[in-house]
Structure formats: structure tokens, C-alpha cells
Image: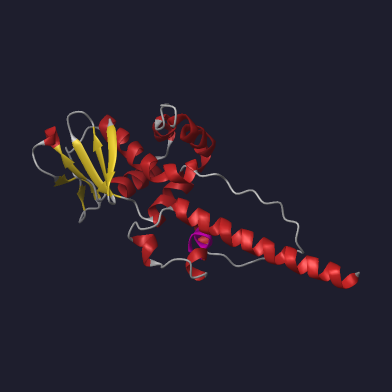
Amino acid sequence: MTISYESKLLTISTGTDLYRTPRMNAFDQFWCLRALEPILEGLNASAKASKSGGGATNPLLSAFTDMPDEMLDGIISRALRHAHRCPGGEDGWRPMWNADADELIEGEVDLQELLQSTALVVWKNLQPFFSRKAFDCQPLGKRPPSFDAVTLPDGLSWLLTPVRRGMCRYESLLDGTLNIADLALMNDFIQAESENESRAYKAAEESRDK
């Protein structure tokens, strides 16, 4: 298979058929990321291997085999619900998803190609997140008193923190403008700024004590 991006559209060629789908929005990417949490280590390794021609989607295909049907259906729907297929590469684009029934249109694609296409779409959307350099910061500043913070369920507070800080618009999480790699970078920056403020406060206190 080959894949390419034109603007926000991802195109996949299987050799005989073409598939086209817009980039998954940040919420869908985040949902898939949490669903794939048990194999994150393998995906991180694949991100490095893919730079040298390794099989990037193999961990995904293996995970799909052992995944509960409900979770796999959730990943397939998020990856392909806006996808179009061009059989033979010349018969015109037609939707793969029945929006009214919220399910794949029967007969559009066989199971093996469905899973392979899903894996490629998910991988292409999540690869920037796994390929980024992880932020590592040892806390050295003065820590505020600890307390049980209220957070949104399913990790959504992390997703929405850059919106609350005014670094992006909420709509950008919905229309594919931002991916979770962008949001990870913004959250890393917020964490770095918070640590710098704590270090500056600690340094000022130590200076006064001298």
C-alpha cells in the first residue's frame, strides 16, 4: 500500500483500489490512542522502525486480532466514517460509511483490507505523536500544596488544557486543524512554563533568606 496527504485528505492506494479520508479530529485521535494504550510501547518502537522501512502498522494489526469487538468497531468507525473508496482506481469515489445506520456499507471492502486500511489511517494520524521527542523535566521548583484536583473523565482535561490557556481554539480540535502531537507539544510547553514559575518562586525565596 502507498499513502499520501493532500491538504487534510489522506489517500491510500492498495494497488487496485483507492481510499480517501480527511484527517481524524483530535478527539477521535485521542480516543484511539487510549484504546491502544496496551500496545503503546510497540507503537513507539514502530515509529522509530518506520523511519528505516520497518512494518509500522504490524502492532496495530496484531492488536486488532485480540481487541474486543466493541473497541475495534469504535476504532474502525473513527478511522473510516468519513472515508470514500474508488474501486479499481477509476470508478469514482463512493462513501464507505452509512451515516444513518452508523455502520460500514456492506460489501464495500473485505475484512482483511478493511483492517489494513484502518491500521494505515490510524497509524498515519497518530504517527506524529509517537515520532515526537518526549518532554522530560525533573521538577526542582517549589511545589504548591497537593490536593485532589477535579478533572474531566477519560483524560479530556489534558486535551482541553491548551484551549483553556488560550493557545488554540476549541474548533481546531474538531476540524482536523490540530492533531494530538500538536496538543502534546502545547501541554509540554504549559508544564515547562509552570515549572519555570515554580523555580523562579523558589529562587526568590532562597534569595530573601540569605
Tell me if residue 149 comes above or below residue 21 in the rendering.
below
Farthest residue toward the bottom?
Answer: 208
Quarter of the image with the N terminus is top left
Task: Examine the residues drawn in magenta and state their main secondary structure.
Answer: helix
Q: Quadrant of residue 62?
A: top left
Closer-to-camera residue (132/114): 132
Provide residue 103's location: percent of width, then percent of height.
24, 48
Q: Is residue 179 left or right of residue 202?
A: left
Q: Which residue appears at 34% of the width and 51% of the height? A: 24
Q: What is the residue that sits farthest to the left in this orientation?
A: 91
Q: Quadrant of residue 107?
A: top left
Relative to 32, is 116 on the left or the right?
left
**Who is closer to the viewer here, 57 or 76?**
57
What residue span does the magenta drawing correspond to?
155-160
- Give me the residue at 72% from left, 65% from top: 198
The stretch drawn in magenta includes residue 156: yes
Judge whether 85 appears above or below 161 on screen.
above
